[in-house]
Image: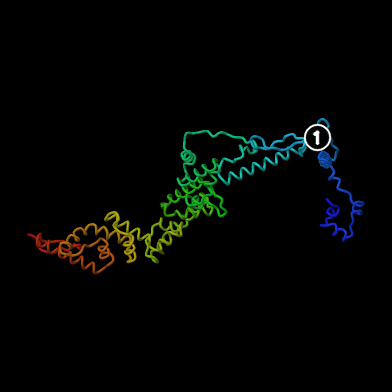
Amino acid sequence: MEWWEQLGYSSEEEAIARGESEEVFNRTRKPDPVETLTDIQREQQFIESRMAEIQANADAGSGEEKEVIVSGGEITKYIIVQGPDGRYVAKADPNGTYTDENVQAEIDRLNAQRDENILNEKLKSGSDDDGGGVYNPRTTDVSYTPVETTGLTTREEAKLRFPYLDERLIDVYVQGYVETGDRNLALLKMRSDPLMETVYPGIRKTDGTLRMTEQEYIVAKEFMQLELRNYNLNPQVFEDDIVEAIAGDVSPQEFSERLQTGYQNIVQNIPQVKEVYLREFNLDLNEESIFGMFVSPRLSTAVLENQIRQSQIMAEAETAIGTRALTVEVARGLQQQGLTQAQARRGFQTAATLLPGLSGGAERFGRGPITSTEFVEATELGRQDIAQQISRVESQITSASAAQAGAARLRSGEVVGLEEI
């Protein structure tokens, strides 16, 4: 390389123009001694610098001087290569850059990086073939307890383990066990599923945790239902109230105490309460109905909307005439016209006795059939149009009977027509 090139100029003329000269360059500048070193000298220089660095690190770590142990007066050097299984190992090499002090740390780093890369590739491709030999990740030893086979399917075992669980939750548990292979994790996945709140309403707190286990929930609910039965109340009517009690952290014992206290207070005032309902709402309620309204505000609303009376009217009709004698709409219509349970009982029982003859006569004389509802409306609610229709049918039946068999008797007990002598 020319002297002016070493000074960074593109030509000798440029260097001279800048005040440089070959004579001054030769006198003041010397070639970089590294350029004249042989390969062996450069290698020796590198080894000495590395030894000095290792020695300095050792002194800094312990505060004491340590000797670098060498074999035969020389440091054993290594290079790092991949073995037959693809993992990195050390190989002795005079020209290597690693020593006993640092070669293992570098091997561990390279193998860890390799394992991570292989795992990432597997997760991306979903394949077991990593294309780079057998995958042997570094793992810690863990204790392993073999799972004892029971001869049952996972679902059958779950039903035996949790006989109180709803079938839908059994399905969620089994799916969790298939995914995790762990019973505890499967149970956690099931309890975090939104279906829990559907099967066991009120079991979950606002923070998402459970107030109680599934079995405790079932026991608490059954206890509350039994307490209601002790007061002649149908637990199905109070399902929502039981759920509200559980969601409000009301214990079964507290629920029982509330019922007992409420019943004592209500029973002492039953006559006055009955009088108020009869006067204000035209409702003749028994003790159970009044106490039920104390237990459930929903039931109280239903009573005030006369839903109970509708049910009573339907029950009386079914008792007298047969199942499904009235629809809910018809019962509501009768209730809205003011029909009481006592009137419904009397009217439908009379209809059951007289309607077969009246309906037959109406058809025989070309009139439309008379229904049990129309009969009750005429006899108990005073519907004149239907009462007149019934009266005409009765008269026709009476006249026809008189001509054939003499006298006939009306509903009022009056004897009409001809009597045979």
Q: Nearer the viewer, residue 385 or 412?
A: 385
Q: Does 241 sit above or below residue 368?
A: above
Q: Please give the residue where the numbered disc 1 appears in the rendered image.
A: 75
Seen as rendered, the residue at the extreme top is: 72
- The percent coordinates of residue 222 (x first, y second) are 46, 47
Name the residue nearer the viewer: 202 or 402.
202
> Farthest residue toward the left?
421
Specify the quadrant of the image occupied by residue 335.
Answer: bottom left
Horizontally, residue 41 falls left or right of residue 159, namely: right
Identify whether 349 is placed above or below 75.
below
Q: Amino acid at mark 1?
A: Ile
Q: Residue at x 54, y 34 (%)?
A: 147
Image coords of residue 12 (percent x, y): 85, 57
Residue, far bottom: 384
Residue 364: image location, x then y, percent:
15, 62
Residue 346 image-quadrant placement: bottom left
Query: Can the viewer see residue 84?
Result: yes
Which colouring convention does the figure follow?
rainbow
Q: Secondary structure at mark 1?
A: loop
From the top left corner, tell me how far across and down residue 338 is, in percent. 33, 65
Within 10 Å of disc 1 (Cα), the crowding (few <14, some 14-19, many 20+) is some
